[in-house]
Image (spheres, grey):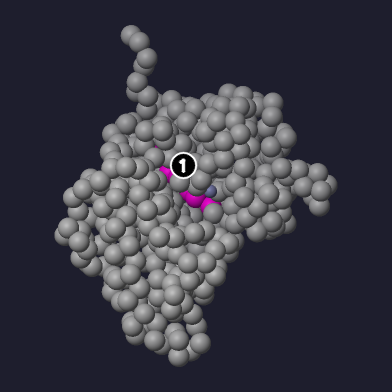
Amino acid sequence: MRRKQGLLIVCDGLGDRPIGRLNGDTPLEHASTPNLDRLVSQGMVGNVYPYKPGVRVGTDVGHLLILGYDTETYYYGRGPIEAASAGIDLKPGDVAFRGNFATVDGDRRIIDRRAGRITEGTAELARALNGMTLEHGVIVLAKELTSHRLAVVFRGAGLSASVKDTDPGATSEGNPWQDPSPLDATPEAARTAVLVREFSIKASNILSNHPVNLERKKRGSLPANFILLRGPGMMGPLPKLDERFPLKPACVAGDKTILGITRMAGFDTFTDPRFTGEADTWLQGKLEKALQLLHTDYDWVLVHVKAPDLAGHDHKPEGKVEIIERLDEAMGFLLKEIDLSRCYVGFTADHSTPCEVGDHSGDPVPTCIAGADVRKDGINRTGERFFRSGSLQNLSARDIFMIQMDLMGRTEKYGA
Ligand SMILES: [Zn+2]
């Protein structure tokens, strides 16, 4: 069977809406992208729904869909993904949470949900919580993530993920933490809610007296003396990509969540301190790494770029234009090095993050799949408006996944 390789660049939050300051263009339409335009002319394009029209998806769900998963079956919540990002191997029955190091006062009122955006000492703080024993012999696993974030896992029998977040959300400063409560009537949910309370208080006592926090107080910084929990989930079965299709996948990224999701899906993951997950990330380095992996034995390489999403959340259309132009420059390098008759090259996004909205939207995302033998749509400009007449228009992220698997010769025939 004829088999080819594929390279997919996922530009997080790339899709956008017309912006007055950009003469009514989207950032992608506005940016100067000679290299992307050349790629686009070599393939199929369209605006693709991450899930369904008008449905806003998170980065986690958006990526599972890009990897072809049915998220109604295989999405287990954000907690398990954060645990995977932290390198914790979940066992069946574990309940995983996203955690924040936070600051509370003597009455456990929240002063800062992010403990002054703490960046240093979180490894020691997490280590002080890791291995804590709760009632019924439940063990706590805790591991730091980027800045104020950490993964928290409860391991033991009879647990449930149906418990309310203790994190009261963005506008909560000055309010008390939310008392843990069960979200259904099962004894497991009731028991887990009690354990969340026990953990929260024990953790607060340990953290309050930890040398890292005593030192922070001395310096006048907010102590990280509480853990707020949200996004509980219980991990279930997730077939690895190479169990679904005959290929060896790799992911190149700086963002820990993406590294976690792709690792869960069976990708080998590659990162570098210069892949920052921010606007200053080393784009050419990512594409060089992808090329190197394609020259070894990887068949499908996914490269993730976080910065367009950050610009969208920060309401910075010019910043989004700039990162797109920097990506275009790196694409110039890639297109010189890659053979489109052996490897398909595409780009897409996990969702749109329109700069004027400052959050994810349900708009479809600009997408391209190029290659020597891909049917040509005859479009040679890059942007949502130019892609409307392309053959991928109105398809879904899972359709785009299947089209890539088919082009690469990895699918089974339907029928005889
Ligand atoms: Zn995203």
Residue 389, position as x, y percentages in the image:
69, 26
Q: Residue at x 53, y 52 (%)?
A: 305
User: Foreground residue, 19 or 76?
Assistant: 76
Does the image show residue 355?
A: yes
Q: Main secondary structure of the magenta part?
A: strand
Residues drawn in magenta? 298-305
Q: Is 155 rendered above or below residue 54?
A: below
Image quarter of residue 148? bottom left
Is 383 placed left or right of 12 in the picture?
right
Three-letter residue code for mark 1: Val
Q: Residue at x 43, y 72 (%)?
A: 108
Q: Residue furthest bottom?
A: 218
Image quarter of residue 18? top right
Magenta-colored stretch includes residue 353: no
Q: Quadrant of the C terminus?
A: top left
- Asked if ligand 1 lies within 8 A of label 1, the reply is no
Q: Is 370 rendered above or below residue 24?
A: above
Q: Residue furthest left?
A: 137
Q: Which residue is denoted by mark 1 in the rendering?
A: 61
Is 329 placed left or right of 119 in the picture?
right
Q: Label 1: state its secondary structure.
A: helix
What is the crowding at mark 1: few (fewer than 14 residues within 10 Å), some, or many (at least 20)? many
Does the image show residue 6?
A: no
Image quarter of residue 199? bottom left
Q: Residue at x 53, y 26 (%)?
A: 373
Q: Residue furthest top?
A: 416
Residue 339, position as x, y percentages in the image:
50, 39
Q: Is 398 rendered above or below residue 208?
A: above
Q: Residue at x 48, y 67 (%)?
A: 176
User: Foreground residue, 31 or 183?
Assistant: 183
Residue 208, position as x, y percentages in the image:
36, 80
